[in-house]
Image (spheres, rainbow, N blue to C red):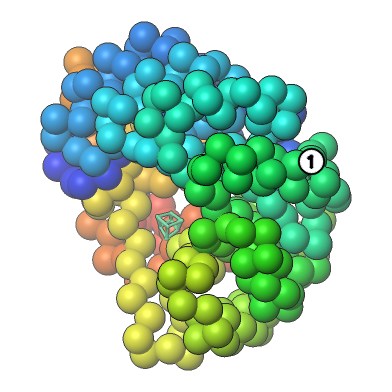
Amino acid sequence: MVEYEGKEVILMACSSCNIKRCKHCYISYEGDRTPLELKKLANILTKRHEVYINGAEVLVNKEYFDSYKIVNQNWMLTNGFEIYKNPSILDYLKERGIEIVEMSYHFGIQDKISKINNSMLEKNIEYLKAKDMKFKLLVTINTENYNMIEKMCDKAVELGAYGIEFTNFLSQGNARNMNSTNLLSSEQISAFFDQLLIVRKKYSKEQLIIDRSGLFGKNKNNSNCHFDCIAGRDMVVVTPDDNVYPCLFLAKPGLEIGKLADGKILLNEYIENEGNLCLAQELCNNNNEEFVSKVLKLRK
Ligand code: SF4
C-alpha cells in the first residue's frame, strides 16, 4: 500500500440524517463516528492535509462541531431541518466558528424530493440573516429544472444569498430508485452551461458566487473550462468505517481505494487520475464502469 500524499481529505462524520434521506440523496455508506473519534482524526490528519468535515447531516450530533475549528472550517452543509426546528442552534454554531451555512434549496423540485419545503427554508434564511450569517444555496439540477438557471440566480440574489451551487442529479444512493428521466442528456448539460455563462456575466462575484459541481463534467463548448477531477489524486474521502474512497459521490462499498490505519491514509495503489472526466458522472450516469475501474485500479 502507498501513503496518500494528496491535498484534500473529506472526513465523513456520519451517514445518519434527521429526515431519513431525501429521494435524490447519493449517500451510499453506513455508520457514524463518535464526536471524540472525529476530533482525534481531525487533529492527526490536519497536520498533513486540508481537511473538510461533511455529513450526511452533521447536525444530527452538535458535538461534531467541536472539530470544525481544528480543521479551520468556517462553513457547514445542511438540509436545514434542524435550523428550522431549533433556530437557536445558530448561536451554538457561531460560537464554534461557523460563519457560512450551505443549505439545500432545490428550485422547482424541492417538494418532490425532500420533506423540507420552500417556506421552511425561507424561514431559515430569515434566521440566518438575523444572526448575520452568510448562506449559499445548494441546488440539484435535473430534467425538470435545468432550464431555470437564470430564475434561480435571480431568486438567490433576492433572498440575499452570497452564493449558489449547482449539482448534477446523480444516479447514486437513494436516487437510484428515482426514474432515469431525471438524468440530463448531453444536450441538456450543454444548455445548462450556456445559461451558466449568461448568469456569470449578469452577476459579479460580489453580487453572487455561482458555482457548479464537477458532476456536469467538462464544458466541451468552452475552451476556458478549467475542469479537473481530482478524485483519488488530490482528494480522498474517509468514511466512519475507516474506508477510503475517491470522492463523496463514490463513497460506496465496492469502490474502496484504501484504508485509514493508525491515523494514516493508505491507498491500495497510487491513483493516476488524469482528471478529464468526472468519475462519478461516468460511473453512475454514463455507466462507464470500465473507465472508472481502470482509473481507480479497482479489483474485480
Ligand atoms: S468524481 Fe471528480 S469531478 Fe466528479 S464530483 Fe468527484 S471529484 Fe468532482
Give above or below for 167 relative to 127.
below
Give above or below for 223 relative to 91.
below
Give above or below for 178 relative to 92.
below
Q: Which residue is found at the position 19% from the left and 22% from the top?
A: 44
Residue 98 in percent (x, y) is at: 43, 34
Badge 1 element: helix
Residue 73 in percent (x, y) is at: 34, 37
Quadrant of the rendered image holding ligand 1: bottom left
Q: Quadrant of the C terminus?
A: top left
Q: Which residue is found at the position 54% from the left and 16% from the top?
A: 61
Res 207 visible: yes
The image quadrant of residue 84 is top right
The residue wearing badge 1 is 120
Q: Which residue is found at the position 35% from the left and 62% from the top?
A: 229
The answer to whether 45 appears left or right of 250 in the picture is left
Res 284 visible: no
Residue 90 in percent (x, y) is at: 56, 29
Q: Quadrant of the N terminus?
A: top left
Which amino acid is tagged 1?
Answer: Met
Task: Please rate how many residues cluster around mark 1, counting C-alpha atoms within 10 Å: few if below 14, some from 14 to 19, many from 20.
Answer: some
| Count of marks placed on residues | 1
